[in-house]
Amino acid sequence: MEDPEGGAKPQFDGASAVGRKDGKKSRRRKGKRGGQSRSAAHPASHEPSGGAGQPARPMEDAAGNPARKRKRRRRGGQGVAQGGSPHPHAMEQPQAAGNAARSEGEPAPGRRNRRKHRGKRGLQGRPLTAAKPSPPQQESRAEETARISVPRETQNGTAAGRKVRGDSHPGFQGDRQAGDHPWPEELYAALDLGTNNCRLLIAQPTRPGQFRVVDAFSRIVRLGEGLAASGRLSDEAMERAIEALRICASKLRNREIRRMRLIATEACRQAVNGEEFLSRVVAETGLELEIIDRETEARLAVSGCSSLVGRETRSVVLFDIGGGSSEIAVIRIGDNRFSRLANHITHWTSLPVGVVTLSERHGGRDVTPEVFEGMVREVEGMLVGFDCPEIEIAQTGDFHLIGTSGTVTTLAGVHLDLPRYDRRRVDGIWLSDDEVSAMQAKLLSWDFESRAANPCIGPDRADLVLAGCAILEAIRRRWPSPRMRVADRGLREGLLTDMMADDGVWRRNRNRRGQRAR
């Protein structure tokens, strides 16, 4: 068929006058070129459409067609004067422009407009409702705690003059503005001051049992350095820890935190001057830390890893190899599973040994196979006193180990041969028993410089990783398992999960979702 303005047009089934016996144009093509149509005042501009020898339906006057006037108004009122009558030259200019474009090999304006607005029209060619502006691009949900998505902040800690909000949940629409989080301003914070690290997480609840990390901080402070020999926290170690805590305090002040929990673990439990150190922390940073007992520490480690225990699992031994202590929890899950995995703990223990204390006693720089075996035997002697029934290991995969510590994440990173540590690839990975043994043998064959040069270990952990492997080896000998799951998470995640569950935010959010759906 030919276009009324000249030039061949492709024929579409059911969309042209050729396919219509009555010679009328289909509804889809009607009024497509409202700004370029000929009015009744220009009869010479009408050309036949050539549809089976029948003349095309003449177009109505632009001023007398309300639908066309509305269409022109949406296009900026082109070709219509203020009084509603068409300008004498308003329609000639787009026609000339269209001819010039086609002379250069470009598509006609009508076709360009159809392509431009194709995604904005429904099945019958009616414009759809205007789409809301999409929020700024956010980090993917698999990167919630690996990459930190932090809103742009002003000096008072708010983003662009408003309160800090997260990215919007795709399941919620309605009266929310684009970019708003369905549960705004509910920020939770968890701080864990351990024997080796100082860690902070600030997060916002999302789907039931999950949260989005808003900000995070981690630094190796070695608070327990020299603690095993002297029984006290050294001045240098306390100064390193307070410097890290000052950064954490600044992050907490810059955000509106609904609830926070700040804990200290084994180093402050054992040190004679532990309470004195925490009083100094309050005076210099304003942060009030609580010293938790070992049972609480074990339960928090389990809570932080609950999402990694599948529904088919019936028994799990979860361990957290820390800097000054190692927590082990035996979990047995029956037919009725509680919402909190920590309620399934049947036996637990906390060994007074960690990577810092064990490496200081046996040496961490130059570790021979004999030194490594000596460390393993020391931990095995501690496990002898742990009264726990044996776990029947079936071949159905309903029992496995879960390790949450820098030791197991380091083994996973070395196993994957990562050019740099990537939490997204490590967290949740499965390692077979043979793979764990191979990685331990590989690390034992390296000298200190080789371990320090590995991007997944680094100089800060090069003298600690083999002590962690010795603790892991003792656990594997006590509870042999065909596989182990690696968890790059721990006490902070357990603190956040428990606080959000205690506040019922996921239950309230689920109710709010149902109200919005109605």
Image (spheres, grey):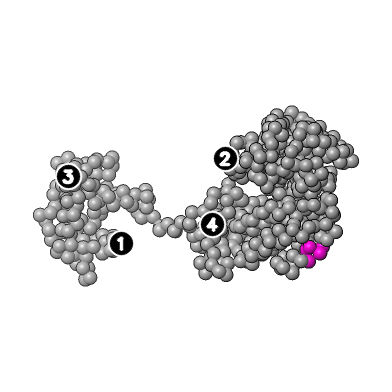
Write down the residue under mark 4: 168
Going from N to C along the chain, the mark reached first, 1 or 4, is 1
What's the residue type where badge 1 is placed?
A: Arg
Q: Disc 1 vs disc 4: which is toward the camera?
A: 4
Q: Is residue 52 visible?
A: yes
What's the residue type where badge 4 is placed?
A: Ser
Going from N to C along the chain, the mark reached first, 4 or 3, is 3
Real-space Cα distance between discs 1 and 4? 31 Å
What's the residue type where badge 3 is placed?
A: Gly
Q: Position of residue 209 (x, y in %)?
A: 66, 51
Residue 206 covered by magenta stretch = no
Question: In the rendered structure, are the residues bearing label 1 and label 2 in contact, judged by CB atoms less than 8 Å apart?
Answer: no
Q: Nearer the viewer, residue 456 or 187?
A: 456
Find residue 13 and name its label. none
Question: In the rendered structure, are the residues bearing label 2 and label 3 in contact, judged by CB atoms less than 8 Å apart?
Answer: no
- Residue drawn at x 78%, y 63% is 278
Crowding around mark 2 (Cα neighbors within 10 Å: few <14, some 14 to 19, many 20+) is few
- Residue drawn at x 21%, y 71% is 83
Crowding around mark 3 (Cα neighbors within 10 Å: few <14, some 14 to 19, many 20+) is few
Residue 276 covered by magenta stretch = yes
Find residue 74 and name its label. 1
- Residue drawn at x 58%, y 43% is 420
Q: Is residue 330 above or below residue 84?
A: above
Going from N to C along the chain, the mark reached first, 3 or 1, is 3
Q: Which residues are magenta?
A: 275-279
Kind of element beneath mark 2:
loop
What's the residue type where badge 2 is placed?
A: Pro
Kind of element beneath mark 4:
loop
Kind of element beneath mark 1:
helix
Find residue 7 and name its label. 3
Q: Disc 4 vs disc 2: which is toward the camera?
A: 2
Write down the residue under mark 2: 419
